[in-house]
Image: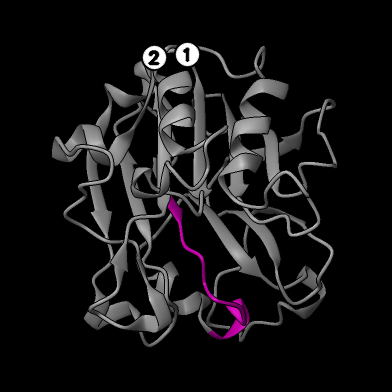
Amino acid sequence: MKITTWNCNMAFRKKASVILEHHPDILIVPECEHPDKLIFSDDIPAPADMCWFGENRNKGLGIFSYSPFRFKLQRNYNKELKTVIPLTVTGGGFDFTLFAIWANNPGDADGQYVEQVWKAIHYYNRRIKSNQTMLIGDFNSNSIWDRKYRVGNHSHVVNKLDRKGIKSCYHLHYNQEQGKEAHPTFYLYKHQDKPYHLDYCFASSDLARSIQSVEIGDHASWSRYSDHMPVMITFAFPGAGS
């Protein structure tokens, strides 16, 4: 199974072909327009399943399946945590709980970025289990800003997930420390000299044991499309996806 997150920086309909060349089974797309606006040419494969969440029809969170996997929104979805989306994923040979994330809620006075993830992992505490669980998307956070967010900062999120045996796939695969990532996922204003690591896939240990590869898009190839680089993780689940 290959799962990918890519903040497309809007206008996904014009950029879908680029990311689909990498054959994701599941694709998480922050800053994706509403499905009514997603009119693709005939040579772009249609998703087998999809869902979308947001208030701005030009800029929400899209979740797409290009495989047998199907999505079902969990009944305890908290609409106040607008784009932290709890989904049950089935049909691809391996069932799991997926939290698709775009940490961006300007209307929350407590904080619009990593605070959203912090709130979510408490609200969904019973759903975030030590097995068959994944959290993936644009977290808009890094431990380098911990002092700015004194309650519910990035390290608090990482540590709480770690206590459940849920770890960042990138950091596991490349043996990296939080805040010292060698591969940026975001370039401020698309400038190569302003790199940050903001996009993550956290997986429970049973899933993480099956990581085959973790790929981060490079600036030269992707900055023409977005300020974010795609994060692509391939798992070797028997019979799962492609």
Callout 1 amino acid: Asn
User: Which numbered mark, 2 or 1, is in the foreground of this view?
Assistant: 2
Q: Position of residue 109 (x, y in %)?
A: 78, 49
Q: Say if 29 sits above or below 147 in the image.
A: below
**Residue closer to the observer: 237 or 195:** 195
Q: Position of residue 18 (x, y in %)?
A: 41, 77
Q: How is the image coloured?
A: one colour
Quadrant of the rendered structure where residue 196 is? bottom left
**CA distance for labels 2 and 1:** 8 Å
Callout 2 amino acid: Gly
Can you say which quadrant of the picture contains the C terminus?
A: top left
In magenta, the rendered stretch is 4-14
**Are dots 2 and 1 in contact, CB under 8 Å?**
yes
The reply to whether residue 104 is in sight is yes
Q: Position of residue 11 (x, y in %)?
A: 62, 82
The reply to whether residue 90 is in sight is no
Q: Residue at x 47, y 13 (%)?
A: 131
Q: Is residue 7 magenta?
A: yes
Q: Residue at x 45, y 38 (%)?
A: 154
Q: Which residue is mark 2?
A: 165
Quadrant of the rendered structure where residue 22 is? bottom left
Can you say which quadrant of the picture contains the N terminus?
A: top left
Q: Which residue is mark 1?
A: 131
Q: Is residue 146 magenta?
A: no
Mark 1, secondary structure of its residue: loop
**Residue closer to the observer: 189 or 10:** 189
